[in-house]
Image: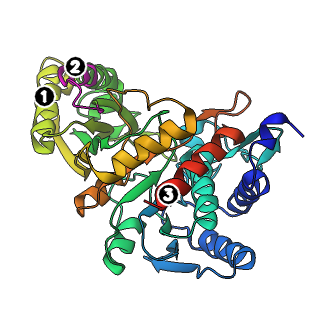
Amino acid sequence: MASGLRRLGPFLSTIPRILRVLDATAAPRGGERAAATALRAWCAARWPEIDWIVQPYGRSGANLVATHGTGPLLYSHLDTSLDSAPADAAVTGRADPAGRLRVSGEQAEGFGLGVARAPAAAALAAFAEAGSGTLLLAGSGTHRRGSAGTGLEAYLDAYPPPPAAIVAKSGPATVLWEEPGALYLRVRLTGRYGAVLARRSAVPEGGVIAHIGVVVDALEAWCHGYARSRPGVGQVGATAGIGAIRAGRPDKPDLFPASLELDLYVVTVPGESPDALAEEVERRVRTVCAGTPLGVCAVSVEVDVVHAAAATPRGAAIVTAAWAAWTEEFGAEPPPITGWTGSTDGVVLRGRGVDTVRLGPQAVPSEDDPRRDVVDLVRLAAYSRLYRRLIGV
């Protein structure tokens, strides 16, 4: 037995077993019911003294909820950032299956470990060992444009608000009590469609796609300028990037499309105005396109706010407890951090008046397949111990 695994103690078998249960059933955003049901059955057989509840919401979303009574909420989510190999091929460049979970020595490697099966497994193991608090493994914890309500919102609508919350999600090796906001911007340029066999039939000539570089360069310049112009606030910072481009029909490329759409993801600091950002981007695109063939196109920018930035006071009891638990577990205070650009449902909890901290294990992409994550089981067990301490606060 590897020396690190000896230090896992009661988590030696529990965490890898939970990871295998999670790995066995797909959990796409909004479609977690089958995964929640399978996990509930496994948990009920292993810990029958606990009441494990599947809370359905929406068409096929679901949460797994369990409680020991009073105490903080320990939260993670069931859905993975990617959905499935064929559906994600446009992002990953691969349509082959990502493969099953592998556990070898002190490491686990598999699909969806970073977001968020590894921290979810650590949270579940911690809750099962604790004697207080509530566990919520929610659906719809990952961001999507134009999505319906999240599993966390469904939980908060149905249950009393918790006294505090711990977000178990992979991230920086420290304690976060502040998180940035997030929003999507859709930039649309519209000309006139035409036929490839008659290039001049499209407006602009050759179609909007022929001039896409003008728009991409303008938006990339805006993204870099935006990040530079927003100084960090506390622990968080700002960033932005182009994540999707659409135009035309792949099954009918003999036509020039009239519309070109580019989607941006924007991470925001406190006080940012989403509407002002949309107006700023629209002005930039109009200005840059004015002297090009795209100057004849209509330009519009739509904004879809995921959530605004939010923070818990540094002196809140849950933050103080997380700081002390971290120091006890790792033998040093949590490292300082600035410019953090990762946002989670912690902002939803803070929006409901719940003091919240975030901490979780680190995951790295597999060298063989970046769709798969690698996590250290010894480190994962350390975070599980941290969660168990905090549930008792």
Query: Which residue carries the number 2 mark?
Result: 225
Q: Looking at the picture, how far across and down is residue 151, in whole percent?
A: 42, 68
Question: Pointer 2: residues within 10 angstroms few (<14), some, or many (20+)?
Answer: few
Distance, label 3 to label 1, CA atoms, is 42 Å
Give the percent coordinates (x, y) of residue 104: 83, 40
Q: Secondary structure at mark 2?
A: helix
- Between 247 and 251, the one lying in front of the other is 247
Q: State which tag comes first along the sequence, 2 or 1.
A: 2
Give me the residue at 24% from left, 64% from top. Answer: 352
Which of these two is toward me, 24 or 330? 330
- Taking 206 as reference, is 254 above or below it? below
Q: Which disc, if any, is residue 76?
A: 3
Q: Is residue 318 above or below residue 107?
A: below
- Give yes or no for residue 33 being in the magenta stretch: no
Mark 3, Cα crowd under 10 Å, few <14 / some 14-19 / many 20+, is many
Residue 226 among those drawn in magenta: yes
Give the amino acid at mark 2. Answer: Gly
Residue at 90% across / 40% down in the picture? Answer: 1
**Is 202 on the left-hand or right-hand side of 385?**
left
> Residue tagged by mark 1?
286
Closest to the camera, between mark 3 and mark 1, is 3
Viewer can see residue 117: yes
Query: What range is drawn magenta here?
Result: 223-236
Taking the spot 42% from the left edge, 73% from the top edge, the residue there is 70
Distance between the alpha carbons at the discs numbered 2 and 1: 17 Å
Q: Give the amino acid type for the residue marked by disc 1 in the picture.
A: Arg
Say which element carries label 1. helix
